[in-house]
Amino acid sequence: MTVSKNSGNLVEHLLAGDRRAAARLITMVENETDDHHEIMRRIYPNTGHAMILGVTGAAGVGKSSLTDHVIGKLREQGKTVGVVLVDPSSPFTGGAFLGDRIRLQRHARDEGVFIRSMASRGYLGGLSRATYDVIRIIEAMGRDVIIVETLGAGQDEIDVIHIAQTCLLVVTPGMGDDIQAMKAGLMEVAHIVVLNKADLEGTDTCLRHLQATMDVARFDEGAWVPRIVATVSVASKREHIQGLDELMAAIAEHQEYLHKNEAIDRVKFQRIEQELGLIFKDALQKLVLKGLKGTGKKKKYIQKIMEGKSDPYSVVEEVMKTYILSREERQT
Amino acid sequence: MSKKRKKRIKVLITKVGLDGHDRGAKVIASLLKEAGMEVIYLGMYQTPEGIVKTAMDEDVDVIGVSYLSGEHLVFTPKIVEEMRKNNLDDVLLIAGGTFPVEDIPTMEEMGIDRVFRAGTLSGEIMEYINKNVRES
C-alpha cells in the first residue's frame, strides 16, 4: 500500500495500525516538520494505554540482548510490542551509528513487533528529544507494550523515568562496589535492577553489594522496594540463558503494584508533566531565538560581557523583557 | 501539504546471506557516520525480507548492501523484488564490495542504483548519496 505523504492521511492510517504510516510520522516528528505539532495534536488523544517499559544502564551491559528476550517473552504472551532504541549522535558531525537493532533482528519479520532506532541528536538525559512523541505515535498504532531502551547511560541520564512505568536498570559484575551503587542517579530510578552477565566472576559479591544498598535505603510504608534479578542474556547454548522468567515475573509484579495502588495515575501525571515542560521550554527558546536571529545582538551582548560592561544574567533579563514581556504587554 | 525539512540522511548498512566478511560494511558505516549521516547497522546473515522490513520501519533513505562472497547476483534480485513489492521506489539501493567488474552492469540492470567497488574514495559515495537521496 502506498501511504500518502499528507500528514492527515498518515494519522488515519496510523490509527488503523499501519506501520508504514508510523515509520513516516516518526521521521516527520524527528525532523520537526512544520506540521509536527498538528500531527501530535491529532495523535495525542489516542495514546496513554500502553504499558511502557524502560531499559537503561551503561554501554555494553546487555540492554539490547535483554530487550530481545523480553520481546520474545511478551510475544509468547500474545502481546504486540513497540520498541524504541536510542543511541548517541556524534557531538562533532551529528552522525550516528545505530547498532542496537542488530541484537533484535530475529523479530524483524514479526508483524507484532515494531522497532525504531533513534539518534539522540544532542538531547541529554539518555533519550532523544523526539522520543516522547515517538512513544505516543507507537501507542497510537495500538501496541500493547512499548520498550524504551536508552543510550548507554552513565550516572545521571535518567529521563526514561519520566516516561517508563516500569524501569529496568541493567548492571554487570565488576562495575564498582556498594559505594557506587549508593550514589544518587541511575540506581534510584530502577524498579528492577538486573544483574546481567551473571555467569561472570564476581556475581555473588555484586549481588551482595546490591542487596546491601537496598537494605540501607529507606522506603516508605507500602512503597515498591526494587527487585534484584540475576540474568545471563547471551550464551553459546540456549540452556545457559538464565533469569528471564524471574525478570518477567518481576515486571508483572511491579505492574500489578502500580495498578493496585493507583500509582499508575501518578506515573501518567509525571509523564505529561515532563512532556509539557519540554514543549514549553522549546517554545520559549524558539520565541527568543527567532527574535534575536539576524539582529546581530547576540554578538554584541557577548562582547559587552567580555568587556565587563554587562553580565550574562543582565543580558538574559533584558532579552526576556524584549521578546517575551513586551509581547505580553502588547496583548493586554 | 507543508514543506518538509530533511535534517539527517538515514542509511541502512547490511550484509546478506552467509557472507561472513563484515569489515568493509563497518568501515563504510563509520565513514557515513563521520559524514553526518545516521546509520543503522544490521551486520551479517540478514535476509532480503528482513532487510526491507527494517528499511520500512526505520524509514531509511538509503539501503547499502555489502557483498564479498560472490552472492551479489543471487541476492540483488531478491532485495529489489522485496523493495518493489513494498513500494520503496524512493529509497536508494547501493552496493559495494568485491565482485567481478563485468558483473556491475548486470547488478545495475537488476535494480541497484549505484555500485561501488573496493577502492572507491569515500567522498564519491557521500557525493552520490547527497545528490540522489529523496527530498523528504
Image (cartoon, grey):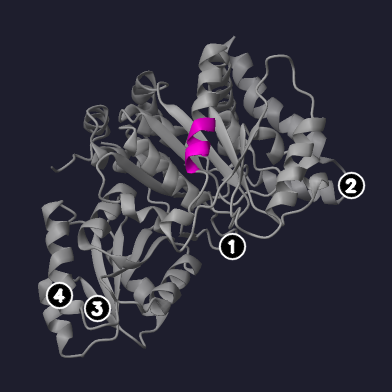
Q: Position of residue B46 (x, y in %)?
A: 29, 64
Disc 4 chain ID:
B
Task: Judge if badges 1 and 4 mark residues of a common chain.
Answer: no
Q: CA distance from mark 1 to mark 4?
A: 39 Å
Task: Judge if badges 1 and 3 mark residues of a common chain.
Answer: no
Q: Position of residue A256 (x, y in %)?
A: 51, 20
Q: What residue is shown with label 1?
A: A92
- Residue bounds of the magenta highlight: A244-250
Element at label 1: loop
Give the numbered dot on residue A308. 2
Q: What residue is shown with label 3?
A: B115
Give the numbered dot on residue B74. 4
Residue A37 figure quarter: top left
Q: Position of residue A22 (x, y in %)?
A: 30, 38
Task: Judge if badges 2 and 1 mark residues of a common chain.
Answer: yes
Q: Nearer the viewer, mark 2 or mark 1?
A: 1
Q: CA distance from mark 2 to mark 1?
A: 31 Å
Whether residue A254 is visible, yes or no, is: yes
Q: CA distance from mark 2 to mark 3?
A: 59 Å
In the displayed structure, does residue A43 sit left or right of residue A255? left
Whether residue B111 is visible, yes or no, is: no
Residue sitting at x 32%, y 54%: A106
Cβ–Cβ below 8 Å for labels 1 and 4? no
Disc 3 chain ID:
B
Cβ–Cβ below 8 Å for labels 2 and 4? no
Residue sitting at x 48%, y 60%: A235
The correct choice, above or below, for A194 with respect to B100 in the image is above
By secondary structure, the bulk of the magenta-drawn segment is best described as helix
Q: Residue furthest front?
A: A239
